[in-house]
Image (tube, rainbow, N blue to C red):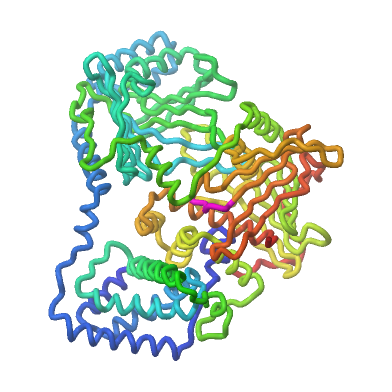
Amino acid sequence: MRSGDFLESMLRRLRYETTADRRQATLENIFHAMDESHERTPAASRPRIGRMTMNTRTTRLALAAAVILIVLGGVTFWPTGRGPDSQWWLGPPAAWGQDLLDSLDRIEAVVYRQRSGRVSGFAPPSISVGWEKRYNAKDRYRRDRYDDGVNIMNTQWVIPDGNDLLMVEVSYQYECYFERRNEAYGFVEDPVQWLSSYVRLLDRADRVLGTEVFDGRTCVGFEVSAAKYGDNPKGQFDRIWFDVETKLPARIERHGLDFGFSPGQTLVIIHDQFQYYAEVPADLFIPVVPEGYVNAHPDEVRAARDAQTKGEMVFAEVPKDLRERIVAALKAVESGSYHEGDTGIHFARYAWRSDGPSTGEPRQTRWYVLKGALPEGPFEPTGDLRLTETVVDFAERTYRVIEHTEPWPPRHPMDNILFIAGLIDRADRLYETTKIDGVEWFGFEVSAKKYGDNPDGAVHRVWFDAATNLPVRMELEWPHSDGSGTTINAKEQFEWDPLLPDDFFIPRIPPGFTPAPD
Amino acid sequence: MFEDRRLLRRLKHGDRDALRLIYERHQGTLLTLAANLLHDPATAEDVVQDVFVGLVRSAPRLQLRRTLRAYLATAVANRVRDHYRRKSRERLAPVEDAGERVADSDGPVQMVIKSEEMHRLRSAVQELPYEQREVIMLRVHAGMKFREIAEHQNVSIKTALSRCQYGLDKVRSMLNSEVVK
């Protein structure tokens, strides 16, 4: 297999060829064009492709940002004159806690990277492609958001302006900017206070995580429940690593945060690549609005663009707690089964399978099993939690085992169900509760254009059992690109927490079956 | 990749053998890419020929920033977009859409593997929005990086990745079930 994904492998086989005669005829035509071109073109002209690319706005900004970081990197402040005490963290916190606070006291500004990760009971953990660079001084703040480490999407500054705090945000993506004064945006957290709060928590740490090396520096980690410093729900915790030598924070992870948009997942926020400065590099905190940018919030620009390309969007009045009730009901489910066309889909946490056709003897069964566990150390998904797909073709008497390593592996059915059901708070309209065959149902429909690049006319419809708040039918109606009609994909005949054999999700390759040819 | 650059240097000096070798190395991939983007094999052949003609004309001043295959694949995708743009203008007049009829005809351009499964797969791919189809095909057949695809589509890399995911999810879904309204 050239790729772990069976579908991608099939797509690769979707190849076309032409006859040898046609290839030769085409080649002759190209030779002819080549001869003509040589007759007409006296000399090679100057190459321009590289220079044109360098002149694009985003590239210029990215280069400027890179230059700034390099300059800053040269004056990075690391407290010196302290030799690494051996395993100081094993002593009583009272002894080394003050040392950590003293290290922080020398700091005027902190620069660090922020990324986010996702954890789900239904999929391997993942980490964001995009990230932020945050510059935090005692009374001012700047944030650069990158989509993939190269293209800068927006920059936000919060700076003192007389007695006010002024926030300026520039969106390079939407070529606009806006300003706010003394609003929620204007909150600047003193980095020393922020990081000191973590130091003060250490005597309440749940456990020591041992040492890790980040950017060539040895660091020691601690884990502490978030409930110990605030009214935070169970399941939220922080991991903090300190540089063994400088005793300054080197990495902070906040686990178990609510992931509003995708209720099947929790969020991990990761701060790392800390740089500490004894002086504030002032020019970083001067807002710069590129010429020609309009004064507007990016949401307004985006809404105007969406209205042009996707049409108007309508939103129904949705009861406040309805989404929470549905998500809670789904999260309490341990397993489920449903039909999609002639395929039966069954799932439990960390495993699912599909049987086609769903009635009679299956022609093909696919098992998907998630193996491994979340890392105990820093949250950097390394592929330890892997998805293995086993395909048994009963007609061909063959099997195939696929280790999924691609960035977007097949999704756990529950991940998809939770995502779609969670769209209820963006519904176009709600279906009123009705009684059919003695069962009360309610439902909603939502235009798929409200997320991603989906076209106008693509619609999700979901119906729920009013007694359980669990789906009974889910539809996706998709318009044909040539305008000839629509296709409806339906999930139906749901069974929640069905009785399934213990070994139902363990792949079984019957004796005598042979590996499928690539 | 180094071989391509060596061939390109020779092509800049008018070496016909170099052109033949470049054509033989990439013609199959480009034809597959064009046919999957267009669903019209006859036009796909024209597109591939146009791309190579464009290559020989621009070769003297061409400086590659990436692989030759990625460059040629992007050129195919650009020409396919031009084709659709022209076609959408022509639709203002009552012109028949010949694409689907040609796709199943016995022309010289044929699918390499013909099976019910592959025909279903082709139909599912046809139903994808063009941007999603383009990301998947540039990724799968031209081996382009998401960064390169994002640059071609003038979107963020995140959008290119999402388009790929949504597209693959839809193809999977369509292969599992199909109820036509």
Magenta region includes residue A385: no
Q: Give the side of residue A367 with respect to residue A155, left or right.
A: right
Q: Give the side of residue A343 with respect to residue A292, left or right.
A: right
Q: Where residue A207 sits in the image (x, y, percent)? A: 52, 21
Report which quarter residue B78 is drawn in.
Answer: bottom left
Quadrant placement of the N terminus of chain A: bottom right
Looking at the image, which residue is at 69% across and 47% down? Answer: A474
Answer yes or no: is residue A142 visible.
no
**A429 and A274: which one is in front?**
A429
Q: Where residue B9 sits in the image (x, y, percent)? A: 23, 75
Question: Magenta residues?
Answer: A453-458
Give the farthest residue toward the left: A42
Quadrant placement of the C terminus of chain A: bottom right
Answer yes or no: is residue A226 visible.
yes
Q: Where residue A108 sits in the image (x, y, percent)? A: 25, 19
Q: Where residue A10 sits in the image (x, y, percent)? A: 58, 66
Looking at the image, which residue is at 64% across and 28% down? Answer: A319
Main secondary structure of the magenta stretch: loop
Looking at the image, which residue is at 72% across and 70% down? Answer: A396
Give the farthest residue toward the front: B93
**A448 and A15: which one is in front?**
A448
User: Where is A376 relative to A6, above or below?
Assistant: above
Q: Give the side of residue A97 with respect to residue A337, left or right.
A: left
